[in-house]
Image (cartoon, grey):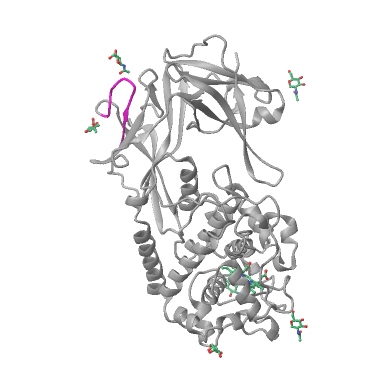
Amino acid sequence: METHSSSIYLSSLLLLLSSLSPSVDAYTWPSPQLDALEQVRWEQIGLTAFLQPCNTFSFDPQRARSGRSNAADWIRTAYHDMATFNIGDGTGGLDGSIRFEEEQARAENVGDGFKNTFSAIGGTSNRYVSIADAVAVAAVLSFSNCGGPEIPFRGGRVDAIEPNAPGVPEPQDSLDSHISSFARQGFTKEEMIGLVACGHSFGSVQHASFPNIAPEVDDPNNTQSNAHFDTTPATFDNNIATEYMTGTTVNPLVVGLNETTNSDKRIFGSDGNVTMRSFADSPEVFASTCAHLMARMIDTVPAGTKLTEVVTPLPVKPSNLDLLLVGDKIQLDGQVRFWNMIEDSSRRVRLLWDDHNGSNSASNNATLRFSRVGTSSGGRNRFAFYSFSPDTGSTGPTIMALDAVAGITNMRFAVDSKIEDQGGLGFPVMDDIMFASTSCYRGTRTNVTGGRIDIAVRNDANPTRIYLERSGRDSTGRPTIQEIDVPIPKITVPSGSSAYSIWSYELPTDSASIFASYNIGAEVGGVKSPRSGFRRSIDQLEACV
Ligand code: HEM
Ligand SMILES: *[C@@H]1O[C@H](CO)[C@@H](O)[C@H](O)[C@H]1NC(C)=O
Ligand SMILES: *[C@@H]1O[C@H](CO)[C@@H](O)[C@H](O)[C@H]1NC(C)=O
Ligand SMILES: *[C@@H]1O[C@H](CO)[C@@H](O)[C@H](O)[C@H]1NC(C)=O
Ligand SMILES: *[C@@H]1O[C@H](CO)[C@@H](O)[C@H](O)[C@H]1NC(C)=O
Ligand SMILES: *[C@@H]1O[C@H](CO)[C@@H](O)[C@H](O)[C@H]1NC(C)=O
Ligand SMILES: *[C@@H]1O[C@H](CO)[C@@H](O)[C@H](O)[C@H]1NC(C)=O
């Protein structure tokens, strides 16, 4: 068993790596959308907690003892969102439409698993990761974190603004109707067998939703009386196929008492068991088939949607880069993340940077402080963060403060003697426009009544427009960005540095505006782009004087 599961993911990992070949295809940092997708897909912050361990179920006080799992809900959600696809006219598909109550209320979407999924993954979507991308990535992580293969993931799905036409197959439908339903979704009969087996490697039929298929049981470890598809319902493995082939299956859609609802039995046997036998014979074949079919499933999107390239982990990635003008210094905050790296106290990581003054890494050279290690995909991936705080021993300054006149234009990293510079490009940094520490609140800390956001603008930057970005949601839940113009100052307002002047924005006094978080964006030379920087809310700053 042990050797099986490790060889499954070894082979699927090799498959993934060989088909992606990161050094050739990897995108270049910075790329805001890919950076955000990469973080969700590979660091998996905010999502792994729901999958640790994989039989975690967050929506019943009995948790795992309920017999359910978040992982199974997430996979079923992705399938039911996709299953509305119509290859004939390109409508439907994985577009987040299953978040609408009207769609969830249909008989084909019985159960509370969809609602649960959105309460779990709600925080994952943002301006760069659509709700549909979050649905897709949640399904991907359910596989990769629970013993399954890494599924190639692309982003860029577009969220529907209304429910799709119905179209999810149901267990009492005939085999012919299932074959034509999957054909409408873009899959052959063999692919249908594969998709159903891959999906039903997880989870169960719930008594609450299908009392006739899943009878009530008296089991303290299955308080919701779920009828599991195989004996390992929270783990990806080929037991769904081995148990079926050996006639020991407990799958309620195979051995259910009512033949009408034995849809897995009809589907699995529809090619004379050829596909299921291949899965039972080889965990590797099952894993690689599932990786391929699940990737196609989540990439089944409305016609016209342009998906990104497959999101691969960047080997070296600046993270949470934040520039703040403080007096005549630029405070540089953030981390650099190294993929596939474990802790090593003898390792020395240096930040080398270029500035506007013609100086380069020879003099701009700081040793960085080890910050932390992270893991993802159930410990399969490991990465280490070094923070942009100079490691000057226990007494030195902990914040990198750069001369603002010299500024910073590009970064490289030295890991011991190896230079990491994106193949010579370096990691470009925009220091033309940033928040200034003179931003302030009015009133008192406990009663903030307004505030001023100060933005430092480099003398040679010449922006035609600076705006604050405020994130929100529209009435259908889609992430939105509201742009708030910062007025061009009538006279030059000096900053603490001779290289920068200040543009200010006085916040309206409604509390929603005061406590909202803002990013800065700017248009320079006709190009509009966000600047690096943490979101800041006014109550994180000092009082105005
Ligand atoms: C003819 C096609 C299919 C039929 C008739 C079917 C039927 C069902 C039924 C009746 C349930 C029980 C749901 C509940 O009680 O809440 C279920 C659960 C599930 N299905 Fe399917 N299914 C089909 C295809 C798929 C596919 C293609 C996938 C994914 C690739 C999938 C993934 C799942 C998962 C993960 C669960 C478990 C959900 C949980 O435990 O919370 N199904 N399916
Ligand atoms: C329930 O699960 C626990 C922990 O896995 C196990 O020790 C116990 O024997 C199980 N109880 C029953 C009735 O199966
Ligand atoms: C079997 O299931 C079908 C579809 O749900 C239902 O119409 C039928 O009454 C069931 N038969 C029995 C004997 O329960
Ligand atoms: C497929 O295999 C199952 C389990 O061995 C068996 O019951 C069934 O008759 C087979 N179906 C076909 C079409 O061979
Ligand atoms: C920048 O260059 C000027 C002129 O070469 C020099 O006087 C100044 O000290 C330099 N500043 C920094 C921070 O290197
Ligand atoms: C950075 O400084 C260290 C120590 O002063 C030195 O050993 C190293 O060679 C420097 N790196 C570069 C690229 O200049
Ligand atoms: C907050 O300050 C404003 C302006 O000074 C005042 O009108 C208001 O009553 C204060 N609110 C509270 C809850 O103290």
One can see residue 349 in this view: no
Location of residue 200 in the rendering, given as x and y in whole percent from the top left corner: 57, 72
Q: Residue at x 72, y 67 (%)?
A: 110
Q: Nearer the viewer, residue 409 or 495?
A: 409
Location of residue 237 in the rendering, given as x and y in whole percent from the top left corner: 48, 73
Asked if residue 353 lies in the magenta stretch, the reply is yes
Vertical arrangement, residue 293 with respect to residue 126, above or below: below
Q: Residue at x 68, y 26 (%)?
A: 446
* Quadrant position of residue 408: top left
Vertical arrangement, residue 353 with respect to residue 491, above or below: below
Q: Nearer the viewer, residue 80 or 330?
A: 80
Q: Quadrant of the N terminus?
A: bottom left
* Quadrant position of residue 429: top left
**Left or right: 283 in relation to 294:** left
The total number of labels drawn is 0
Vertical arrangement, residue 339 with respect to residue 388, above or below: below
Vertical arrangement, residue 174 with respect to residue 352, above or below: below
Q: Residue at x 63, y 80 (%)?
A: 175
Q: Quadrant of the C terminus?
A: top right
Location of residue 211 in the rendering, given as x and y in whole percent from the top left corner: 74, 76
Residue closest to the far front: 88
One can see residue 3 in this view: yes
Residue closest to the far top: 491
Location of residue 317 in the rendering, given as x and y in whole percent from the top left corner: 39, 42
Magenta residues, start to end: 350-361
Asked if residue 321 lies in the magenta stretch, the reply is no
Indicate the quadrant of ligand 3 in the picture: bottom right
